[in-house]
Amino acid sequence: MTQKEKTIKIAPVTRLEGHGELTVRLTSTGQVKDVQFNVSSTRFFEKFIEGRFAEEAPRIAPRICGICPEPHHLAATKAVEAAWNITPPPAAVKLRRLLINAKQFSSHALHFFALAAPDFLAGPMGDPALRNVVSIIKALPDIGKMALEVMQFGQDLAAAVGGKAIHPVTSTPGGMLNPFSEEKRDLFLKRVEKAKSQALETVTLAKKVVQDYWDPITKLAVTPTYYLGMHSKGALEIFDGNLRVMDPTGKIVADFDPREYLTYYGEYVPNHSYATHIYFRPVGYPDGIWRANSLARINIADKMATPLAQEAFKEMRDALGKPIHATFAYHWARVIELVQAVEEIEGLLKDPQIVSTDVKLSNVEPKAGDGVGCVEAPRGTLIHHYWTDEIGIITKANMVVATNNNIAGIEKSLLDVARQIFEDKAHENLKLPDPMIK
């Protein structure tokens, strides 16, 4: 009797900030034929904002994502300002930096503690009923309490600056609608030292996880790709800077202003997914597949922008080298960015200009033009590109979100690990620690 080909389908994929399915196809001899990550829904946001006044874009765009609405809010604002040649007041720029770092802090904490940590603490083969943040809180109440407090600090600060913790409303072409009061500044200054201490504790926890799981981290899904990320004079940056592309050998092969993205971004449309695959255009597809997100930014950076984050960055580089292709190392990179975010928050809160009332231009004139707004969302590089007519109505929009930048790399790493599991049985010989939650 001839064995038939086999298809394994996981629908929906959980622990995912969105909607997706996973399909693995095996040959009759058990070889991996194909792996697909299927994005099964469409959003149409580019069409939603066509025909709208450009001032509305920063209020519509945050609905693209409930996890990272602040980056969309700010990228939309920056795109309109670029199209209309607007330079906002310096205090407004600092408030926007405070907002995006608040989101970076809360989002990285959410991802590490709620999405990643349960599998490590309960063990990847542990009872699924234990692999969740509720189990962490019950079994390890001190860690659970810290996780909730870290996430809360970021969300509270995002709400204080953005008007709401989810779907902010304060950034507008020409500045910010509301200044940041001295009372709010003083309130968060009292809380930031504890948040910084907890960020460092999170780094310690992450390092223990890495040490305990060194075998799978350094052996499973070690997938060479290109990497995309933002920097400012070589330092890791998430709000305003140039974009770098690193090849799989660690060489920087492009360094460009985000306005030039169409020269470097290629777009491949797979038949099995509604999400397009963005890749390094000069190389082509699939050779030019790249990844964004925390590890990509760590890879392309020469250094971190803040001292404590730099110490953690150096420790990671010393341990894993450059570039780092281990997919599981994204978790380590994420907590390094967590530290930089809270250090930048502290610096901005101590800046006297953060409570300036000069945060909005008095007159903003719409005009015909096109502009690119680029920031780093927690999951990767985000671009909004808008074209407007002479009265300021958006006639065309192009949005390249983190999912587009990452999905081809996700499929490639899933293909690698599927071959290791189904063909090489590599997972059977991995050294795994005893779980902390049983």
Image (cartoon, rainbow, N blue to C red):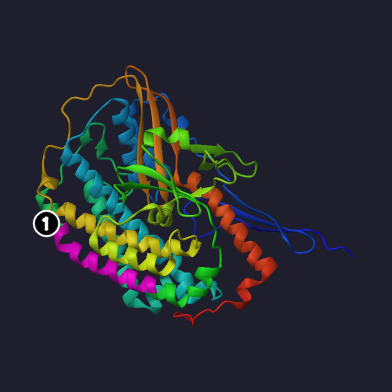
- Residue at 33% from the left image edge and 16% from the top image edge: 390
The region drawn magenta spans 188-207
Q: Nearer the viewer, residue 44 or 325?
A: 325
Q: Which residue is mark 1?
A: 186
Q: Nearer the viewer, residue 300 or 72?
A: 300
- Residue at 59% from the left image edge and 58% from the top image edge: 414
Q: Position of residue 298 (x, y in %)?
A: 38, 56
In what element is the residue under mark 1? helix
Q: Quadrant of the N terminus?
A: bottom right
Q: Amino acid at mark 1?
A: Asp
Q: Nearer the viewer, residue 74 or 229?
A: 229
- Measured along the vertical axis of the image, is residue 327 above or below residue 145? above
Q: Is residue 190 magenta?
A: yes
Q: Visible in this render: residue 45?
A: no
Give the main secondary structure of the magenta stretch.
helix
- Looking at the image, residue 243 sits to the left or right of residue 249; the answer is left
Identify the image quadrant of residue 322.
bottom left
